[in-house]
Image (spheres, rainbow, N blue to C red):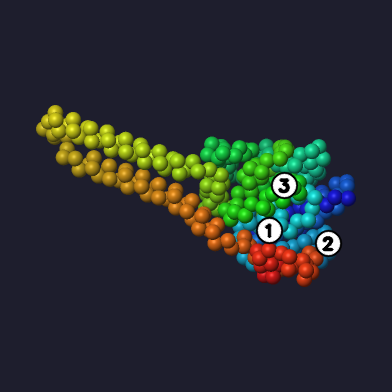
Amino acid sequence: MKLLSVVIPCFNEELVLPAAHERLSRAVSAIDGFDHELIFIDDGSRDDTFRLLTEIQSHDSHVRVLRLSRNFGHQIAVTAGLEAAAGDVIVVIDADLQDPPEVIAEMIDLWRQGNHVVYGIRTTRAGESRFKLMTAKAFYRIINRFSDTPMPVDTGDFRLMDRKVVDVLLAMPERGRFLRGMVSWIGFRQAPLAYERQPRGAGRTKYSLFRMIQFALDGILSFSVLPLRLAALTGLVAIGFALAGIVMAVVVRLLGLYDLRLGRGWASLFVAVLFMGGVQLLSLGVMGEYLGRIYTEVKRRPLYAVQERLGFEVPRADQLDSRTANERVKVLF
């Protein structure tokens, strides 16, 4: 019998956790030929999420709980769950029940047909604002225009992955993680599965406008150097404007058009200085974003620290000794 691991990141999800556990358990228990484990990752919640997870785990031996030492963000929490997963097949799904757990059975059917990744395509997104729908639609189009790696549109992190795909994914150590793009980069045989996204079971979204912008930047900057090329192109355009200005100034001087009292040049000079200053600052900002990511990578800090583990076997001393330094930190914290 194969093992199905379901990774569920949680951040302040106390209102929906009991219902999420019940529906997930019912959905995966009905899949023939699979045992299962439900791995909940408490990403530094400030409500009763961990207490509820502790109670759920004490009554369900299929439940595993990772409590991170602080809020590291959704993509890092998912990564922590993937590293803890022991399954032959791994599914990532949020705890808010917007992605129906019942769809997992359909994903398994597509996996049995030889697909290594099955990703959910949202045909409808109930309960989300028009602004969120418009920005999400624009985001996927923009990132495909910028990126060298084609990515399916209207998808999220709700997906099934074969063990071999997860192993490759975990071998990619970058800190600015954009998992749906990383999975697309890996390749293998991938198949879409259309489904209707539901309203949140309870609570509210944890993605503020700032987090959405940061997430979009991670996606673009992690998979494309086009912003750097655009900065250089903008510089060339600015040089072209400057050369045109020089030519115009010479022509005006030779033809004596200053007598027409078109101005003494302060306005054009003011605009030119502002334009060049804006181009330079924009270019520095783009380069700074990439440089900041290099700085973050070279520090080689662990992606996360685990405060508590529930439902996992305690590693033996010989297993612990064979781990890398990063893995030891995650176990000992």
Give 295 or 103, whichever is nearer the viewer: 295
The residue identified by callout 2 is 60
Classify mark 3: helix, strand or loop: helix
Which numbered disc flags the more N-terminal residue, 2 or 3?
Answer: 2
- Label 3 amino acid? Val
Q: Position of residue 283 (x, y in %)?
A: 40, 47
Residue at the spot 55% in from the left edge and 47% down from the top edge = 222
**For discs 3 and 1, the disc positioned in front in the rendered view:** 3
Classify mark 2: helix, strand or loop: loop
- Label 1 amino acid? Ala
Quadrant housing the C terminus: bottom right
Q: CA distance from mark 2 to mark 3?
A: 28 Å
Q: CA distance from mark 2 to mark 1?
A: 21 Å
Q: Is residue 240 left or right of residue 50?
A: left
Q: Is residue 99 left or right of residue 219?
A: right
The residue carrying pointer 1 sits among few (fewer than 14), some (14 to 19) or many (20 or more) residues within 10 Å by Cα, namely many
The residue identified by callout 1 is 80
The residue identified by callout 3 is 165
Which of the 4 image quarters holds residue 183?
Answer: top right
Res. 146 visible in picture? yes
Identify whether 235 is placed above or below 69. above
**For discs 2 and 1, the disc positioned in front in the rendered view:** 1
Residue at the spot 54% in from the left edge and 36% down from the top edge = 145
